Image (cartoon, coloured by chain):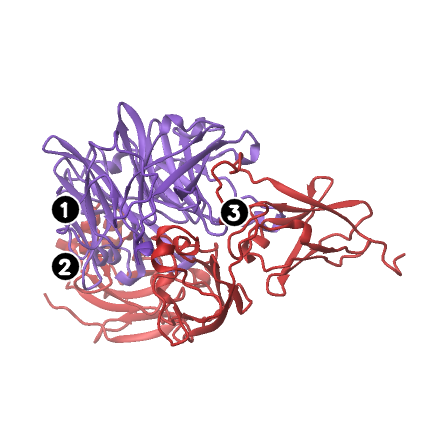
Amino acid sequence: MVVRLLCAAAVTGSLVIATACGRSAGSTSEPAIRLSSTENGGAAYVEVTGLSGEALDSLRDAELTADQWSGILRVAVSDAAPGMLGNYSVADSALRFTPMYPLDPGRQYQVRFDPAHLPTAGVAGGSAIVASVGQPAQHTTPSTVVARVYPTSDAVPENLLRMYIEFSGPMGWPSGVEHMKLLDEKGKEIPGAFLPLDYEFWNPDHTRFTAFFDPGRVKAGILPNQQMGRALNTGRSVTLVISPEWRDQHGLPLKEEFRRVLRVGPAEDKPLDTGSWSIQPPSVGQRDGVVVTFHKPLDYGLLMRALGVTREGVTVEGQIVVDQAETRWTFTPREPWRTGAYHLLALDILEDVAGNQIGRAFEVDNFETVDKSPNPTSITIPFRATAASGVK
Amino acid sequence: MNSLRLKLAFLVAFIVIASLSPSSALQVAQTGQGPTLASIGPLAFGAEGTLFTADNQGAAIFALDLGEQANGGAAGAKSLDALDEKLAALLGTGAREIAVTDLVVHPRTRNAYVSVMRGQGAGAAPALFRIDGAGAIVNVTLQSLKFQKVELPNAPAANTAARTNPRTQVITDMAFADGRLWVAGLSNEEFASKLRAIPYPFATVDRGVSVEIYHGNHKAVETRSPINAFVPYTLNNQQHLIAGYTCTPLVKFPISDLKAGEKVRGTTIAEFGAGNRVLDMIVYRKGGQEFLLTANNSRGVMKIPTHTFASAAPITTPVETETGGVPFEKVTSMTGIEQLDKLDDNNSIVVARTVAGGLNLQVAALP
């Protein structure tokens, strides 16, 4: 068998088209391999052109196994690898292989067409041709960064329960706490600070990761806490380090290492007291925000979910902004405020950064006082929009 | 210091809660052919060969009828070196670009089924493979499968913006027992662990039972510790779940007690050490005796005779030793285990991480 290596490659759009060395590219009489895509830059597929009408007819009517198809046209990640999963068809006067999963940009695929395995091999004959095809890498320069870490305050309690790591773009994997380190004041790693789990906690678009501190160490009086103590200790500073090896959705490392120094304060062990919240009422007829201020930072993720506004029992639609180191929550309604009563609705799953909930501290015996319903109970706090000066 | 070495036993309380409110009901979203999974894994087989697949990204669970795709392979499963490379090649990518999310064995054919995520981040796509006794790897075409789908209840939300983002739970393990699919999950926001029971067929589901788990020491300090893995197990002719928690109490509780509105306390029967979590567990019989085999992330594989489970004294007082409760032995011959299932009466099957970082599929005699 004579294998004719394909060496010419031309870029058309985003695709690399490979043609046979020493052959006239695009010839209708000689088979050639090319990488194409559906219109408008859709999914890429591999085609063998230049086949006779008889060969195409035999393929169109053929009922072949996956192995038999692969014997005719094989697309693989390497010469030694098995043919990848996909579908075979005859379209546009060519034999087409459509991969089951999109081709990876920047990866070269090895293609082998062997006419000896065609159903009409006895008539068509011919020798095998191979090609290396691929799409150019779309992303080669690291650009994703850690955009923000919650809590945003540099002062945290020593029983901090979780952190949210927000990235500037979607992240990939492997991911998780193995890319995160806490260093003490001497730059030495504090081992076992974060809870290692087999599963990852992401928001749907993979831009926010939740890291839990090991609650066994956070909670006073249980074994890990007694053996190792808390990872954070009052009066000390620690440095959170997030490694650039954490890969983004393109498989690229972060643009840069992330570091932030945290000053550790006393444990926060009191339940949330809604009576201490201050509500700055909005103005009737306006779309200014109702502003709720807390006496300590609350959990960012839950502030976005477990706090809302209702009117006559119906949820009011609007936008939420959390700022001031998660001590201020502002709700801006879609429609102007009306006269009459509104309620601030707080689900009792709302927590501060140490896991204390409304009326329920993290550090208490809950055997006899747990929820009686899987739906969280809620607390409502009435407020009214005030008559704004100058409003007609 | 002695005080620092004091071993505090754990007592686990299960608070079983049922709600009649519509918002807690589990709704059947879809029954049909060609499921659309956003992600895949963990997996669990029902006794009749129904494959339950968790879709964490889609906050749903699918019951897949494998149909003819369950047939045709050589019985059993065969060891395969470089499993990750082989699967990645079929998926047209590199081994670094895939994640093996679970491994389960079909109850009739004993073929291994491996779930895989291909690609990165939100763009990753699910794939399911069958590996037979001849070592053949066959892609299970999801598009042709009949399915039932049940969506997990939305996370509670107080505002409309949050309701567009219901995915806050991660399913950590599933098992089918007593006509119900048991699902353990953990929230990615509030630190809360849930165990749900979903009757099957899903078509009969109109509401679910939600189980909130509290885990504490003898002083009843709760930690809301997550269940990492669990198995159904019969004790004194009563169906139980045996569950492994983070840091690493082993707990038993009868599922007949898990009734709406009642409070059930699980019983801690062993402590397998701090800084550890159970990855997978199976039950098997050897030499006329039954054992629980657990794969752990930092304490290797443990073989635990089950004959003491029924009579084991609850751990309710401090113990001075590193581990406590029912006895176990370490299985040093099994290393790097990331996924574990029982292949047949004599063998386990595992996905094991090699020293070089690759993944092997290994059939290993039950210890």
Residue that carries the numbered disc 2 in the rendered image: A125
Label 1 crowd (10 A; few <14 / some 14-19 / many >=20):
some
Task: Name the element at disc 2.
Answer: loop
Residue B361 left/right relative to B122: left
Chain B in the picture: what colour?
Answer: purple
- Depth check, mark 2 against mark 1: the one in front is 1
Can residue B188 be seen here? Answer: yes
- Point out the frontmost of discs 3 and 2: 3
Q: Nearer the viewer, residue B322 or A120?
A: B322
Q: Is residue A99 visible?
A: no
The x and y percentages for residue A245 are 35, 70
- What's the mark number on residue B276? none
Indicate the secondary structure of the residue bearing disc 3. Answer: loop
Residue B36 spot, x, y in % from top left: 41, 44
Q: Kindly report the distance in space between the C-alpha atoms of the residues bearing marks 3 and 1.
A: 39 Å
Rendering quarter of residue A378:
top right
* Chain of the residue on which disc 2 is drawn: A
Q: Residue at x 27, y 76 (%)?
A: A8
Given the image, on which type of amino acid does mark 1 rest?
Answer: Val
Q: Is residue B112 left or right of residue B42?
A: left
Q: Quadrant of residue A39?
A: bottom left
Separation of residues labelled 3 and 2 (CA atoms): 59 Å
Are the residues flagged by discs 2 and 1 from a single subunit? no
Residue sitting at 12 percent across and 51 percent down? B333
Instruction: Examine the rendered structure and indicate whether residue A144 appears above or below residue B178.
Output: below
Between A59 and B227, the residue placed more toward the observer is B227
Give A173 or B273, whichever is nearer the viewer: B273
Q: Amino acid at mark 3?
A: Pro
